Image (cartoon, rainbow, N blue to C red):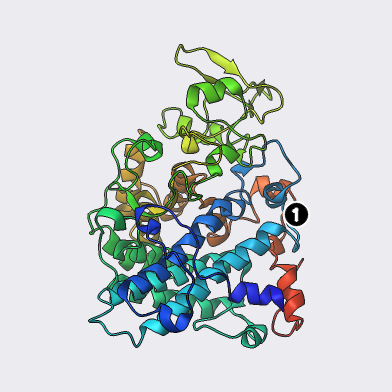
């Protein structure tokens, strides 16, 4: 009983990041008096954003580690390596915390939506925005839940502990109906942009882009094309230089930004992923202003670097250029390291994984205190999804035009004259090069039906049941009714 109550009734507020998330309530009050003013509802919605900060620091375990381009670095006996090796048990701690945190968000925004329905718009002056943000957050949470776990309990109103125990796992298709309806509402209610301290909140563009991804995931290519086309008319643009996406000394809310999980150093609202994924070496720390903490949770797979075209500007950013790989032709082990300002090659000590990506490298004053945001969706992702939808709808020539926008930014030659099937493969590959380590690869493999045929994953013994993760065993036990709450097959 206590576990399910924690799932449904978490603390109402928690710390969160970016300027707008600093606007936190400083006391705990009963819900009878909490929801009165516009700021009350603003603070309540911020409570939903706050949990995203925590849960997204482990999203790579599902979205990247499960795929073929990322692997565990030094430590092979933790949550990350379980996902990498396809051996995640239902007792895995990360599985349990991810489940709880997404339902924490859902409970918080359900409470907002229930209380705001009768709110006076003259008092709650941003009523529509609060509703739009709440529905966006609920949609994003459920979208991640169904992609990770499959059928999940569908809660659209606050429920009691007894009701929670009686709530069955709902079929994915029905959950998608709620996700889609939430995003349709959110795109109509949210503003196109914010200014000042509010930058970082969900916008209408974020809702449209996420809705396009949902349609694409559902293989509704007609609606995906239509919705993603709308996003292309909203003023977003690719940054001219790909490496600027990962220069965290610059403003991350640029022309390509659509929606991030916001992090700010200090006050427990920073990102620990930077330290987690980097090599642990004193000279690397001295030069880059940051180093790993010893486990190197996610590093590039051996084969990834050799898949890039030689002149692809994304290559050295996505996969550090100085080795740590087995040459696929000669079988030679290329030593890992990095190049300093004098052009000298600095070898990594044997205890490191020898591999890393520059996508998370940014100086920090303290360990696990990185400012880098988690890029949930950016414009290049939208362009490639739009190209995919166009191609699936028989508009291959137009699809190639959009695909080539991303390729030209990367400094590689545009495609011409490809067939529909060739274009399909080209788009899938381009997403890999453009978006690796940004939370897309595993979900792309599932969405396109390519996971079971993947050579790397076949080498790990992938089976159909691996396409979903186990639901937390603690939740199966506390409900204790397999007719409404069962474990996923294979676990």
Q: Residue at x 46, y 34 (%)?
A: 362
Q: Position of residue 42 (x, y in %)?
A: 36, 69
Q: Classify 426 as above or below 323.
A: below
Q: In this figure, which residue is indicated by the disc labeled 1?
A: 87
| Observer-nearest of 93 and 144 | 93
Specify the quadrant of the image occupied by residue 258.
Answer: bottom left
Q: Is residue 229 visible?
A: no
| 13 lies above or below 365 | below
Total numbered labels? 1
Q: Crowding at label 1, few (<14), some or many (≥20) Cα neighbours within 10 Å?
A: some
- Residue located at (32% from left, 48% from top): 253
Q: Secondary structure at mark 1?
A: loop
Q: Say whether residue 363 is left or right of residue 19.
A: right
Q: Quadrant of the C terminus?
A: bottom right
The x and y percentages for residue 250 are: 33, 38
**Is residue 334 shown to the viewer in this render?**
yes
Q: Position of residue 224 (x, y in %)?
A: 37, 66
Q: Position of residue 315 (x, y in %)?
A: 47, 32
């Amino acid at each position: 009983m206590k576990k399910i109550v924690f799932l449904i009734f978490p603390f109402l507020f928690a710390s969160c990041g970016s300027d707008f998330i600093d606007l936190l309530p400083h006391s705990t009050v009963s819900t009878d008096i909490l929801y009165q003013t516009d700021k009350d509802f603003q603070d309540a919605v911020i409570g939903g954003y706050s949990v995203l900060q925590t849960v997204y620091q482990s999203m790579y375990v599902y979205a990247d580690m499960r795929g073929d381009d990322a692997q565990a670095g030094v430590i092979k006996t933790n949550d990350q390596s379980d996902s990498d090796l396809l051996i995640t048990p239902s007792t895995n701690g990360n599985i349990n915390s991810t489940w709880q945190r997404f339902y924490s968000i859902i409970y918080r925004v359900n409470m907002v939506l229930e209380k705001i329905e009768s709110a006076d718009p003259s008092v709650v002056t941003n009523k529509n925005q609060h509703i739009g943000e709440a529905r966006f957050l609920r949609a994003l949470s459920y979208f991640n839940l169904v992609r990770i776990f499959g059928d999940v309990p569908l809660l659209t109103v606050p429920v009691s502990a007894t009701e929670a125990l009686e709530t069955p796992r709902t079929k994915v298709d029905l959950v998608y109906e709620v996700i889609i309806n939430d995003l349709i509402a959110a795109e109509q209610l949210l503003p196109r942009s914010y200014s000042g301290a509010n930058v970082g909140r969900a916008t209408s563009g974020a809702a449209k882009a996420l809705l396009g991804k949902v349609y694409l995931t559902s293989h509704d290519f007609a609606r995906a094309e239509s919705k993603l086309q709308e996003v292309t008319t909203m003023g977003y643009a690719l940054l001219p230089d790909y490496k600027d996406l990962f220069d965290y000394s610059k403003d991350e809310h640029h022309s390509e930004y659509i929606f991030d999980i916001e992090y700010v150093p200090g006050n427990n609202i920073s990102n620990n992923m930077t330290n987690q994924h980097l090599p642990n070496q004193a000279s690397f720390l001295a030069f880059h202003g940051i180093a790993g903490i010893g486990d190197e949770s996610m590093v590039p797979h051996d084969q990834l670097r050799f898949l890039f075209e030689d002149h692809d500007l994304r290559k050295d950013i996505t996969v550090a250029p100085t080795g740590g790989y087995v040459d696929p032709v000669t079988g030679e082990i290329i030593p890992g390291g990095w190049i300093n300002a004098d052009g000298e090659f600095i070898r990594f000590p044997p205890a490191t994984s020898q591999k890393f990506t520059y996508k998370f490298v940014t100086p920090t004053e303290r360990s696990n205190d990185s400012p880098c945001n988690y890029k949930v969706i950016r414009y290049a992702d939208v362009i490639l999804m739009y190209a995919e939808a166009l191609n699936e709808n028989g508009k291959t020539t137009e699809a190639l035009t959009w695909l080539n926008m991303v390729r030209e930014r990367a400094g590689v030659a545009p495609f011409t004259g490809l067939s529909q099937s060739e274009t399909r493969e080209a788009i899938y590959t381009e997403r890999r090069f453009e978006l690796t380590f940004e939370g897309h690869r595993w979900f792309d493999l599932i969405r396109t039906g390519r996971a079971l045929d993947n050579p790397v994953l076949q080498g790990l013994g992938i089976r159909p049941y691996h396409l979903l993760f186990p639901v937390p065993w603690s939740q199966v036990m506390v409900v204790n009714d397999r007719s409404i709450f069962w474990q996923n097959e294979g676990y």
